Amino acid sequence: MRDIERIQLAGGIEMPTVGFGTYLIPDEVADHAVTQALCAGYRHIDTAESYRNERGVGSAIRKAEDELGLSRSEVFVTTKLWPGNPAWGDPTKTPAETVAAFVASLERLDTEYIDLYLTHAPFAGPQRLDQWRALLELKDGGRARAVGVSNFGVGHLEEIDAAGLPLPTVNQIELHPWSQKLELIDYMEGKGIRAVAYSSLVPLASWRSKEGQKSAKTAEMRAAGERMDSPFRAMAEKYGKSEAQVLLRWAVQKGFVAIPKSISQERMRENLDLFSFEIDTTDMAAIERMDRGGGVAWAAGDPMLTG
Ligand SMILES: NC(=O)c1ccc[n+]([C@@H]2O[C@H](COP(=O)([O-])OP(=O)(O)OC[C@H]3O[C@@H](n4cnc5c(N)ncnc54)[C@H](OP(=O)(O)O)[C@@H]3O)[C@@H](O)[C@H]2O)c1
């Protein structure tokens, strides 16, 4: 098994450039799925309070110590604060509630620390900075090794900067050839904020195609997706890889961290095999021309557009 490349976050923390996503993996399946992912070679697991699967994820990581000889320190664990969203009738978490949510995640994950703790989206409006201060305190206390955000746009990041607070280490955002967010990436690179790409596989016609897997990728876009697939099919053939591998290789080649989710052990392995080929400059340029704007993974639209 080839080693997964790692990047350095501030403070010398190492993060594997490919992680295992767990959204839509139910708690009762998460233990088995994460165990399979660890067996396949993943050393970075992405979960969230709102995925309701932290117990299953934690159980797999704990068991891996005895069953796979993998110590907790060998697995990079990300989880996310659900910040609340008044627009959905869900009150914003206060700083005290933010800390309580973090402690509850620690308990469910059965761990003493989180490698990376993110706020899930910029939904806290006027309380956004207070929540960010609470995350910074968790980092200072050592129980979160690094803290960051998710779905933050330039304006949300500038708000933190303007308040004179330390910027997030990471911004986890929807990034793929259809949603390349060039201005945001440029801003983040200038400020040393690493991009973690989620929903990398959106352009595949089969992406979240099963019953109950809602997103804003409409039937119309899916139909367009069938056509959009062809350049990836041609590229996949050219490199002797799958279309999914081309999409994930694009992410890592751009310097992003990718966190593909799969419940199939074969696809888990396939999604890790990204370091034996390189997309050439002609194909990278062709992909750059496929940008369509905002993300489509959230049923309610790209959360980055929140004011
Ligand atoms: N911060 C946020 O707001 C946010 C939002 C969305 C996602 N995320 C995180 O990012 C992770 C990844 O995003 P995602 O789950 O939305 O989408 P994704 O990983 O891009 O795609 C998952 C979908 O693609 C399929 N798939 C996986 N590997 C494949 C392959 N090699 N060939 C063909 N199909 C394949 C999966 O089906 P099977 O399972 O059947 O293989 C599933 O339908 C999530 O799990 C979550 O951890 C974060």
Image (tube, grey):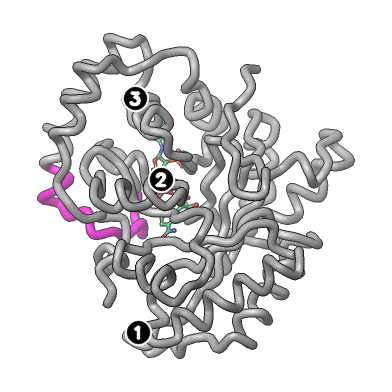
For the stretch drawn in magenta, what is the main secondary structure?
A: loop
Q: Position of residue 4 (x, y in %)?
A: 60, 27
Q: Position of residue 30 (x, y in %)?
A: 63, 52
> Is 215 a magenta residue?
yes
Helix, strand or loop under label 3:
helix
**Disc 2 to disc 1, how far (Cα)?**
25 Å
Asked whether the beta carbons under mark 2 and mark 1 sit within 8 Å of each other, the answer is: no
Which residue is label 1 attached to? Answer: 88
Q: Residue 211 location, x and y as percent? A: 34, 55
The quarter of the rendering in which ligand 1 is drawn is top left
**Split into 4 quadrants, where in the image is the N terminus?**
top right
Q: Where residue 159 appears, x then y in whole percent? A: 37, 73
Label pair 1/3, CB-CB below 8 angstroms: no
Please rate how many residues cluster around mark 1, counting C-alpha atoms within 10 Å: few if below 14, some from 14 to 19, many from 20: few
Quarter-wise, where is residue 298 in the image?
Answer: bottom left
What amino acid type is highlighted by mark number 3? Val
Q: Nearer the viewer, mark 2 or mark 3?
A: 2
Depth check, front residue: 291 or 241: 291
Residue lying at 31% horizontally and 55% vertically, measured from the top left = 297
**Residue 86 picture quarter:** bottom left
Say whether disc 1 or disc 3 marks the residue closer to the N-terminus. Answer: 1
Circle 2 or circle 1, nearest the eye = 2
Where is mark 3, residue-wise?
A: 246
**Mark 2: which secondary structure?**
strand
Q: Residue at x 27, y 9 (%)?
A: 238
Magenta range: 209-223
